[in-house]
Amino acid sequence: MAFLHSAAAAREIDRLATAALGGDGYRLMQRAGQAAWRVLLQRWPRAQRIVVACGSGNNGGDGYVLARLALQSGRQVRVVHPPGGGPRSGLAQRACTDYLAAGGHVELFPSPLDDADVLVDALFGIGLERAPKPEYAALVEALDQAEAPLFALDVPSGIDADRGCAPGVALHAGCTLQFIVEHVGLRTGIALDHVGELLLDTLDVDAAEYAETAPASATLLRADALRQWLLPRRRDTHKGESGRVLCIGGELGGGGAVLLCAEAALRAGAGLAIIATREAHVAAILARRPEVMVRAVHDAGGLSPLLANAGVVACGPGLGQQAWGESLFRAALASNRPLVLDADALNLLAASGLRPPADAILTPHPGEAARLLDTDIAGIQRDRFAAAAALAARYGCTVVLKGAGTIIASPGRIPAVLDAGNPGMATGGMGDLLTGTIAAARAQGLSAFEAACAGALLHSLAGDAAASEGGQRGLLPSDLLPWLRRLSNPEEA
């Protein structure tokens, strides 16, 4: 587990670290330039012609330090900046002066970029919050269209380091080196298509020393986090300890969705999985998965005894939004059972104005999130962290905002972001699988937030493992089922 920081926190840590160094910010800038130069040498050891695009602030200063080091190593170095984009901060001016003193020179853009072996982006760093001005946008576009690999310092130019969006033009880096801390916005949304390989150099600064005044904005969940939640079982464990998951859904034509949910619950470790669905689906479900208990439910009254015996209720896969589905949804909401709500249950929730219990878990994709917040998808994707926080606040429960860089948010908790998942998982039925996986984690005794984190991480890791076998395109939800079982036993992996 790693910590992700906002731009404001990064600036504060930089300020405090500078003070600890006696107030000499140039020492940190030199460390940043040296760290970037080391990465460039490691990634592109044969590069002889290096072009560094420098902005006017301290990110540009980092670029000037790298340019000087490259020049002193015998490389051919050119620094370019847009008209009026020369160094303005005191540290950047000092770095530029040292570069010029070493024999370097600076060119104004437009300047040829097609003769470079590596292009270095040191234009904005964490300072960008709006679309680049035209003169900068032209340089960003030229860098992005050049054939040489792009190496971004701290943040790819055009990407908002807090929100992960691109307010205007943004370049696509092959590699991004972050300094001191990891930036929260680079782990979700459109930013993931721009950062390339994400690296971190702390510059010998321990951000934990400043956690009280510059706290992290989110945690990053990697595969090793599963071990804290999915513990080995006792030898005398019985199925009741692993929980009973009731999966509600499967309007006519939607039986596959609720079956995927139940299968995921079983593969992720639930002791029992029961499906409440339309009678037309019962025989087919039993033929496909005899381990699942299936009950035909005609109305909310028929659901009552199943709800009474459920440990966790997963409601929504294939549910539909007609009278049958709505009656079951309302019964589940009133059941006083831990809930995982997805798909049509979320659409019904948005339309009803009802509030789920505090220990419920909502799993919306951006479209469902937009309906829950009465906004549009663009608004959700423009600031996914704000959207997840708004959902958690409005509905008073845990939220899993799906998509690239899935975010888990809950009132009073620092949000979590998944460092797992791939584009192949953007296919019908993956959400049904996620619902069952989270419900299984909840049934095994985890809190709502822990279950959301563990289930979402397990699901995404299974997707990555399945994609590694046969590729992302054509990945099916059922391809993840064997991996859910393997990865839900991390002590055996």
Image (tube, rainbow, N blue to C red):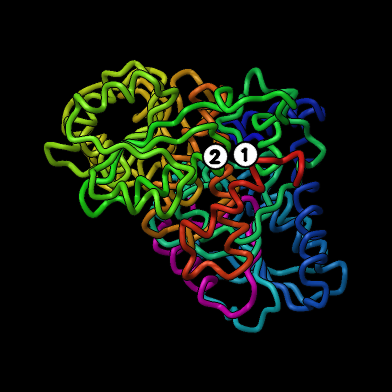
Check disc 2 and give the amino acid type: Val
- Magenta stretch: includes residue 228: no
Check disc 1 and give the amino acid type: Leu
Question: In the image, is residue 167 above or below residue 265?
Answer: below
What are the residue bounds of the magenta stretch?
A: 132-159
Residue at the extreme left: 323
Reading the image, the residue beneath label 2 is 417
For image coordinates 21% across by 23% down, the residue present is 354
Percent x, y of residue 483: 61, 52
Reading the image, the residue beneath label 1 is 221
Find residue 375 and report its image quarter.
top left
Residue nearest the viewer, comparing 312 with 294: 294
Q: Secondary structure at mark 2?
A: strand
User: Are discs 1 and 2 less than 8 Å apart at CB?
Assistant: yes
From the viewer's perspective, is 439 left or right of 275?
Answer: right
From the viewer's perspective, is 313 left or right of 142?
Answer: left
